[in-house]
Amino acid sequence: MDVLNYGGLHVTRDVQASVLAFLAVFVGAFSITTVLLAAMGLDLVTALSASATAFANVGPGLGEIIGPAGNFSSLQDEAKWVLSAAMLLGRLELFTVLVLLDPDYWRG
C-alpha cells in the first residue's frame, strides 16, 4: 500500500477520512441547494452558479439573471432564503454548523 505524503509529511488515515467527509458534506449541501433553486424555477446554470457563489464565494454567478451584469434582486424570496442559508454554511464552515446542531455537543 502506498503512503500518502503532502509537503514531505505523512498524511494519516484520519486526515484522509476527514477530508473525504468534508468533501462529501460540501458536495451534498451544494447539490441540495442547486436542486432547491432549480425547483423554484431557476435554470440549471443559474442554480449551479448561485450555489457556488453562496457556498464558496466564487464571485458573480453565470446566466442572465445573476451574471456579471445582473444581481439577486429579481429572485423570489424563498430562493434568497436558501442562498442566505448557504452563505452562512459556507462562511461558518459546514462541520462547525453540524457540530452546533448536534444535541450531544450541548449535553457537555
Image (cartoon, rainbow, N blue to C red):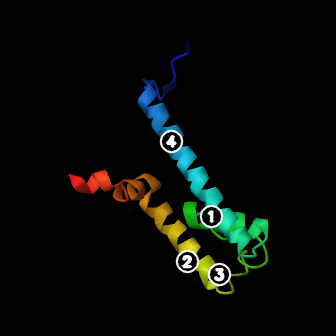
Element carrying mark 3? loop
Amino acid type for the residue under numbered disc 3: Phe
Which sits earlier in the primary sequence, circle 4 or circle 3? 4
Left or right of 93 on screen, residue 24? right
Determine the CA span between mark 2 and mark 3: 11 Å
Give me the residue at 57% from left, 72% from top: 82
- Residue 52: percent from the left, percent from the top? 63, 62
Give me the residue at 44% from left, 57% from top: 93
Q: Is residue 4 above or below residue 53?
A: above
Q: Quadrant of the N terminus?
A: top right
Residue highlighted by disc 3:
72
Pick the front one: 8 or 70: 70
Amino acid type for the residue under numbered disc 2: Trp
- Quadrant for residue 44, please give it: bottom right
**Mark drawn on residue 33:** 1
- Quadrant for residue 63, please give it: bottom right
Q: Is residue 9 above or below residue 21?
A: above
Callout 4 crowding tier (Cα within 10 Å): few <14, some 14–19, many ≥20: few
Amino acid type for the residue under numbered disc 1: Thr
Give me the residue at 71% from left, 81% from top: 70
Left or right of 38 on screen, residue 6? left
Q: Are marks 2 and 4 in contact (CB under 8 Å)?
A: no
Residue highlighted by disc 2:
81
Which sits earlier in the primary sequence, circle 2 or circle 4? 4
Amino acid type for the residue under numbered disc 4: Ala
Element carrying mark 4? helix
Determine the CA span between mark 4 and mark 3: 31 Å
Determine the CA span between mark 2 and mark 4: 26 Å
Outermost residue to the left: 108
Outermost residue to the top: 1
Residue highlighted by disc 4:
21
Which sits earlier in the primary sequence, circle 2 or circle 3? 3
